[in-house]
Amino acid sequence: MDYDVGKDIIIDVKRYLRGKLIRGNKFLYRIADERGPAGSFMDSDSFSGSDKNRDNLKKDSIAVKKDRMADNEIRLEEGIRYSADLPAQNSLFEKRSPEKENKLEQIDFEGLKEEVSRCRRCELYKKRTNTVFGDGNASAGIVFLGEAPGKNEDLQGVPFVGRAGKLLDKILQAIDLKREDIFITNILKCRPPGNRDPKEDEIKACEAFLKRQLELIDPAVICALGRVAAQNLLRTKTPLGKLRGRIHYYNGVKTIVTYHPAALLRNPHFKRPTWEDMKLLKRIYSEAKEQNVV
Ligand code: SF4
């Protein structure tokens, strides 16, 4: 079977493998980059065939693992740094209760929303007015991710309302998007009292909901808004300033990081870098559309 080297094939492989071979995604990219024509890795004989092929694959796997240990960034393209998926053992979304998580793995979008609305997995349920599941298009190509609902969000049950929400709408407008074109949600679905940062145990309790949301939406790109969302999604302590301006991967989905609109309201100097991030976001989204990925 002949295949041309091309993005379409790489992306099809990525989408096929998403959720199946989390650690294998970059491994396959690496084979495509370094082992000659993409046809050689798309050809099923390469996987199931000779001992020699298996030995070569094993060697590549070890080489990639070593690279990751040395540096999470694995390739450079047009000045944008790409980061490897984090090792599975560091995944934000470790399984916590097999019965509960198995149930979530089968649930549809409405079922998930229902499940969140009656959730008591962490203490935050006690003081919430509403859960804030998310808003927008459930099959959007772009997901914006904040940290947690604030006071107005808790009252209305909708994410990003109030001044920060209005600014986000303007940012979307600037890149020709509307709320209906995207989906927007938070790491936590209930408001932490006094808008404090989410606690580790709350994030852990809520993470399976976000994981399932992202699986169901299956966006082309995720945009993490602010330090808390970015660091928890990407499971890193790297400062926001160093995370932005480059492409990361969350379970195979391209992910970028930018400032939270509330931070922009406090500090107008963040506007220019945010605009750069939005141009990158638009570029990734446009490329995905050209390739019919969304
Ligand atoms: S924050 Fe998440 S885990 Fe905690 S009660 Fe709300 S929905 Fe449940």
Image: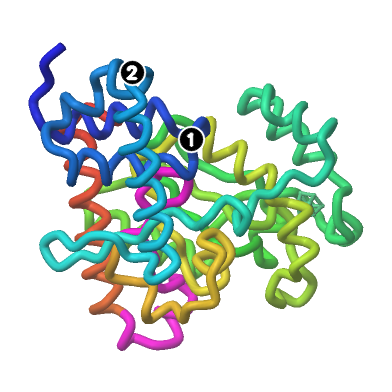
Could you tell whether 89 is left or right of 285 in the image?
right
Please name the amino acid that badge 2 sits on. Answer: Gly
- Taking the spot 41% from the left edge, 52% from the top edge, the residue there is 62
- Taking the spot 46% from the left edge, 65% from the top edge, the residue there is 225
- Taking the spot 48% from the left edge, 71% from the top edge, the residue there is 226
* N-term-proximal mark, 2 vs 1: 1
> What is the quadrant of the N terminus in the image?
top left
What is the secondary structure assignment of the residue under circle 2?
loop
The residues colored magenta run 247-270
Instruction: Please identify, in this view, whether the residue under mark 2 or under mark 1 is nearer the observer.
Output: 2
Q: Residues within 10 Å of mark 2 (few under 14, many from 20)?
A: few
Q: Where is residue 219 shown, x and y percent of the image?
A: 40, 38
What is the secondary structure assignment of the residue under circle 1?
loop
- Label placed on residue 37: none
Along the line of sight, the residue nearer the viewer: 213 or 204: 204
Asked if the stretch drawn in magenta spans residue 249, the answer is: yes
Could you tell whether 24 is left or right of 117 in the image?
left
Farthest residue to the top: give it: 1
Asked if the stretch drawn in magenta spans residue 139, the answer is: no
Q: Which residue is labeled 2 in the image?
A: 49
Q: Where is residue 186 shown, x and y percent of the image?
A: 59, 55
- Label placed on residue 21: 1
Quick check: can you spot residue 161? no
> What is the quadrant of the C terminus in the image?
top left
* Residue 259, quarter of picture: bottom left
Quick check: can you spot residue 261? yes
